[in-house]
Image (cartoon, coloured by chain):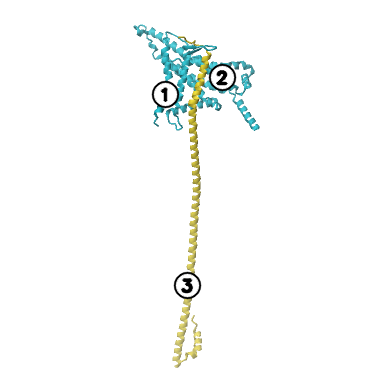
Amino acid sequence: MKVKSRRFMAVDILYILLMVLPMVCGIILQILTKPPTEGIEIAGARIFFTIPMPLQDLPITESQVNSFLVVLTILGFALFITHGISVEGGSRRQIIAEWIVEVTDNMVNTNMGEYFAAFAPFVAGIMALSALSSLMSLLGLYPPTSDMNIVGGWALLVFVLITYYKGKCGPIVYMKSFTEPAALLTPLNVISEIATPVSMAFRHYGNILSGTVISVLLAAGLQGVSNMIFGWLPGFLGEFGWLRIGIPAVLSLYFDIFSGCLQAFIFAMLTMLYISGAFPQDEFERRQRLKLEKQKTIK
Amino acid sequence: MQNLEVISLNLWQILISLANLIIIFIILKKLMYGPVRDVLAKRQAILDGKYREADEAKRSAEESRALWQEKLEGAKDEAERMIKDAASTAERRGDKIIADAKERADGIIRRAESEAELEKKKAAEGVKREIVDVSAALAEKMLEREIRKEDHRALIDSFISEIGDVK
């Protein structure tokens, strides 16, 4: 193993700080600003302040701040993992980086085809953003994915991409694609087209939010049961939610870790399938061929 | 502090989140996928070069092996031919030597024979002369007088011839 220079180490530490500090800042912010809650309370993200904007005011909420922190973390991660990579390889982080790139490349290739090879970082970005946002709840932070606006933004971008690739062969082909397989089905096709981003956003947001809701309900329920069983104990011992120790962790394992990662995977998978499914590949290739032939005849 | 409604839509928040995703995409593309793919492509190029070199080396080795094989075969043939040549030359020379020897032996035998013949003749001649002398002496004694050899030569000769020519 090569001896790393002092400078290299310093930059490494900087990147690690960039990776870790956003989360620490998030936790500090949470501690400083979150008021103590009593009983069952299910609410959206807290609003820090509101910026007046045309059409609609822009409230800067927890989910906005937290997703920005996730972006910073991913930036730190990307910088850290590619720091000092070389053709010879050998370092552990380079193996991980190459593994990530190869896995996502393979995934995009098998699900979308060669034409969409440039989508690998996009898909990886969706996965990283979604998974990290959901996993933020492990740190006790508000997971941005349980805010519909955040997931809605991603779904909107996916919708734009779908429409872009659908219209790749001109507006006529785009319009015609709605009358497939029969002209009678046009209204249904339009509805399903609009339903795509909506269902994507609702699925993701609903899954994460429902996890939070169930966790809150369970915590409250367990508190009640605990009070009933241990209420006869004097003072603090009677009020303490004994049953809240340990049991919620099992649910948290499912809702915070499993569900969060699964939804990230599903969102990325659906993105790939919808975009590649919207692209009229045969028609596009036929046109490319025609164009090439025309160019040849002109020459 | 206020809270957002659980289900609420805000255009600007949606747009900011959309922009966040695009930023993440650009970050990953420029800072992670770009360099890693670059490194992978370079490594692939180096590997390809190495493979090509190895193939080249193998091919040239194969070539020289075939060349040497050919040469070896040629050398074997040459050696065989040389041995055969030498054997035939030796045989020929041996035959010639034997033939020469036979010839010489034949010559010697012939000469010996002729010499023997000559000796025989000489001996016969001697015997003849002896006989002549003896017979002359005998005749002399018988006739009591000297016979002049010279005078009776012809007579004696004919006499001896009558007795039998010694061959």
Q: Point out the frontmost of discs 1 and 2.
A: 1
- 1 or 2: tag closer to the N-terminus: 1
Chain assignment, label 1: A
Secondary structure type for disc 1: helix
Residue B87, percent from left and from top: 48, 59
Disc 2 marks a residue whose amino acid type is Val
The chain coloured cyan is A
Q: Point out the frontmost of discs 3 and 1.
A: 1
Tell me where residue A173 sits by quadrant. top right
Q: Dot 3, how many residues are within 10 Å of its Cα: few (below 14), some (14-19), or many (20+)? A: few
What hue represents chain B? yellow
Q: Dot 2, how many residues are within 10 Å of its Cα: few (below 14), some (14-19), or many (20+)? A: some
Residue labelled with disc 3: B109
Secondary structure type for disc 3: helix
Q: Is residue B57 visible?
A: yes
Disc 1 marks a residue whose amino acid type is Leu
Residue A9, percent from left and from top: 40, 27
| Image point (58%, 21%), residue name | A164
Front-lying residue, A161 or B70? A161
| Image point (59%, 22%), residue name | A166
Q: Is residue A102 visible?
A: no
Q: Can marks 3 and 1 be said to lie on one chain?
A: no
Front-lying residue, A157 or A254? A157
Q: Are marks 1 and 2 in contact (CB under 8 Å)?
A: no
| Numbered circle sitting on residue A14 | 1
Q: Is A176 on the left-hand or right-hand side of A218?
A: right
Image height of A287 relative to A219, above or below: below
Residue labelled with disc 2: A160
